[in-house]
Amino acid sequence: MSTVIVTGGTRGIGLAICEKLLEDGYKVIATGRNPSEDDKLSSPNISYQSLELTSEASIRKFCEVISNVSSLSGLVNNAGINIIKPYAEITDENFDQVISTNLKASFVISRAVVKKLQSSQSHGRIVHIGSIWSVISKSGRASYSASKSALIGLTRAMSAELASQGILVNMVSPGFVNTELTARSLTPEETKSLTSQVPINRMAEPREIAEVVEFLLSKRNSYISGQNIVVDGGFSHV
Ligand code: NDP
């Protein structure tokens, strides 16, 4: 049974990815800042690790866990935050928090996974969760767009170096998804106005993102590498 690590597996898109992977017969290691019993799925095939992505010590500890995982086959860098503010009001601390959580943590955790795959001479799959704001942007999203656009570069560079070793790296960029993060980021009026601009005419459900991620993690993905797959109901091409 192969094992996949999902950061931020306690809620929203990460939770849907964990559910999909368990259904498809994977073992899952899910992280949250401090997962409570209520956050945990009841399956013998999922375990939880506490991980705070803005803490170097917490990430270092988690990387030690990674080095001891058996049958590791994949990683989903899903956990992420968005601080929406007018550009001139974004503090250095705001910017650092978004970049540490969305970009640097993905870089460091991926490196630990790559080392583990290389040392065990295993093939693997890594998926970074981006956002529609990695390819287009909107007022108030400077830190978030910077972090998610940088993940495109990371995806391409990792793919260029690692695909020949059987480690395929891709990114999935959702549009508007029905999660707590969306409810916190947008007013009901903004949600209505934005979804009316989506050709499919609704938000995505987390499961619809999980289906694409699971495909990229599976052996059925034998030739996609270095791509940013946008899953936005057609929004970015209106
Ligand atoms: P949620 O806010 O619903 O869940 C975020 C997850 O990330 C939680 O499990 C949370 O853990 C974890 N997390 C957040 N901050 C940290 C941190 N500092 N350290 C460790 N874990 C952390 O988010 P979504 O499911 O909506 O988003 C998931 C990903 O999808 C993100 O990368 C987001 O940018 C991206 N995305 C989401 C879209 C949407 O419409 N929802 C659209 C485009 C992209 P905890 O339970 O401990 O809080």
Image: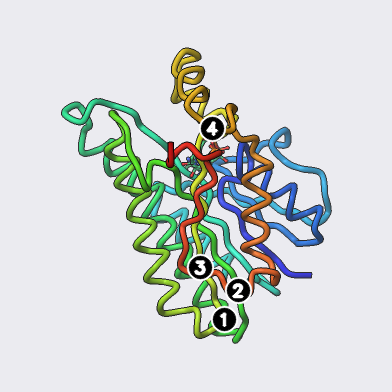
Q: Is residue 220 left or right of residue 62?
A: right
Q: Which mark is residue 166?
A: 1
Label ID, residue 153: none
Sooner in the amino-acid sequence: mark 2 or mark 1:
2
Q: Are marks 2 and 1 in contact (CB under 8 Å)?
A: yes
136 vs 214, nearest the viewer: 136
Which secondary structure, mark 2?
strand
Which mark is first along the chain, 3 or 2? 2
Which three-letter amino acid code belongs to the residue tagged 4? Pro
In this picture, residue 212 sits left or right of residue 146 = right
Measured in 3D between alpha carbons, the distance from the residue under mark 2 to the one under mark 3, in whole angstroms, is 9 Å
Of 235 and 79, the residue lying toward us: 235
Depth check, mark 4 against mark 1: the one in front is 4
Say if mark 4 contacts mark 3, CB within 8 Å: no
Task: Report the residue at 50% width, 85% height from top.
Answer: 164
**Type of amino acid at the residue the image marks with label 2:** Gly
The residue to which callout 3 is attached is 169
User: Residue at the location (42% across, 71% down)?
Assistant: 158
The residue carrying mark 1 has its beta carbon less than 8 Å from ligand 1: no
